[in-house]
Image (spheres, helix red, strand yellow):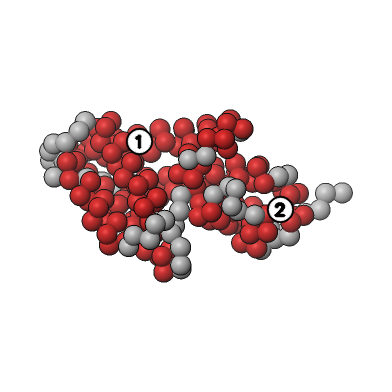
Amino acid sequence: MVRPRTFDESTVLEAAAAQFRVHGYADTSTEQLCEAADVRRSSLYNAFTSKDELFVRALEHYASTMRAIQESILTDVSLSGADRIRKLIDAIVEEERVARAEGHAAGCMGVHTLMNPDLRARNERIARILERDLQKRLGLLEETIRAGRADGSMPGGPDAGEGALLVNTLISGIRVTAQTGVTPDVLHRIALDGLRSLLG
């Protein structure tokens, strides 16, 4: 008889993603995952069969969760297009501020995974999750930039496609630079300077 699960799967995925986004796949141990999720090793592997499977499921959970947060900001029609982009940057930097108070950078599971081509190569689902997530996020950013052009808050700068890539690149840069200990206030100024061509 299969033993009933003694934990909530979404809670475990959230806890696992929190570890992977800070430490990456290789530097996250099974012990860390069990402690973070407050589950026994046997329960973890009964549910997910392996660390690899847990990573894939956690990556999918992380990507959809983070994208939903960004979507709620970028589709807020009460704000101009430019203010939506600024609010998104504010949210990213605030996450780094909270993490810094806890003694680490927030990290990013997507960035960690993109920087590990061997990990993507050995599981095609990882590459598919990352590509699908990137295209959806770029699409949201393009729509926001078009809205900014329509409402006059983004009168110039690169076209919507390149503008979306610019914003996405700056967000990734914030995540990486935060790992070096740069303060949130400096990260915020750098990001807005980088967006000057887009936001004016």
- Residue 124 image point, x, y percent: 58, 30
Residue at 48% x, 36% y is 130
Number of the label disc, if any, that sits on residue 138: 1
The outermost residue toward the bottom is 101
Element type where label 2 sits in the image:
helix
Number of the label disc, if any, that sits on residue 44: 2
Q: Residues within 10 Å of mark 2 (few under 14, many from 20)?
A: many
**Where 54 falls versus 143 (above or below)?**
below
**Where 18 falls versus 130 (above or below)?**
below
Depth order, front residue of 62/119: 119
Q: CA distance from mark 1 to mark 2?
A: 34 Å
Q: Is residue 8 visible?
A: no
Residue at 25% x, 52% y is 190
Number of the label disc, if any, that sits on residue 151: none
Query: Mark 2 and mark 1 in contact (Cβ < 8 Å)?
Result: no
Depth order, front residue of 14/31: 31
